[in-house]
Amino acid sequence: MELSIISFVISILAIIVSVLSLLRKPSVTPVQEEAINSKGLRLQAYERLVLLCERIAIPNLIHRLNIPNISAVEMKIILAENIRQEFDHNSTQQLYVTPVIWDAVRNLKEQNIMLVNQVAASMPADASSGELNKKILEIMMSQPDSNLHEMVLQSINFEARKLMDKK
């Protein structure tokens, strides 16, 4: 009988040890933890840059910031300033992404500001914000193959996927 009690106690202890080992968090070295955190920060940066690109996309800006009954000059200032503010708000993300991606995002910002300024400069002095917005959208629709916004988004997506596929 003593042998059966000892076997029973050993079996119970083995079960307890097994359950505890399953419940215990896997051990991660500090280097592995830093790599995991770094990867997470980089993925968050790519996510923020996608959001930035969507927020500074001209059609989205016009939809979000459309103010009737103001001049085209006032609308130009509002659009350009909003693009700059969105970009500045996310400028720290450059620490976590490749220089190629950051340059692409910066070029998108510059192209959008340049487009707004050029179209506004071509408008009559008494043009309205609605006329400016319409002209900007017409120009964008007439050049669907030269959509830098889509190219930047695809580049960000590609880089993020490469990062996610790394082990």
Image (cartoon, rainbow, N blue to C red):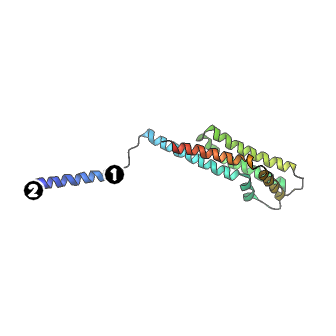
Location of the N terminus (image quadrant): bottom left
Q: Are marks 1 and 2 in contact (CB under 8 Å)?
A: no
Label 2 environment density (alpha carbons within 10 Å; few <14, some 14–19, many ≥20): few
In the orientation shown, which residue stands out farthest toward the left? Answer: 1
Q: Position of residue 111 (x, y in %)?
A: 75, 44
Local SS, label 2: loop
Residue shown at 73% from the left, 59% from the top: 63
Q: Which amino acid does label 1 sit on?
A: Leu
Q: To which quarter of the image does residue 155 belong? A: top right
> Is residue 71 depicted above or below 43 in this figure?
below
- Amino acid under disc 2: Met
Query: In x, y percent, where is residue 83?
Result: 72, 49
| Residue at the bottom extreme of this rendering | 68
Q: Helix, strand or loop at disc 1?
A: helix
Q: Where is residue 2 in the image (x, y as percent from the top left)?
A: 10, 54
x, y percentage for residue 148? Answer: 71, 46
Picture quadrant where residue 27 is located = top left
Seen from the viewer's position, the closer of residues 80 and 109 is: 109
Label 1 crowd bin: few (<14), some (14–19), many (20+), radius 10 Å:
few
Q: How much space separates mark 1 and mark 2, taking CA atoms?
A: 32 Å
Residue at image point 79% right, 49% down: 116
- Residue nearest the viewer, comparing 1 with 150: 150
Q: Earlier in the sequence, mark 1 or mark 2?
A: 2
- Asked if residue 106 is positioned above or below residue 133 in the image, the reply reads above
The residue pinned by badge 1 equals 22
Q: In this view, does 148 lie to the left or right of 24?
A: right
**Residue 15 left/right relative to 56:** left
Give the residue at the far front of this rendering: 145
Name the mark on residue 1.
2
Position of residue 73 in the picture relative to residue 11 (left or right): right
The residue nearer to you, when weighing 152 against 36, is 152
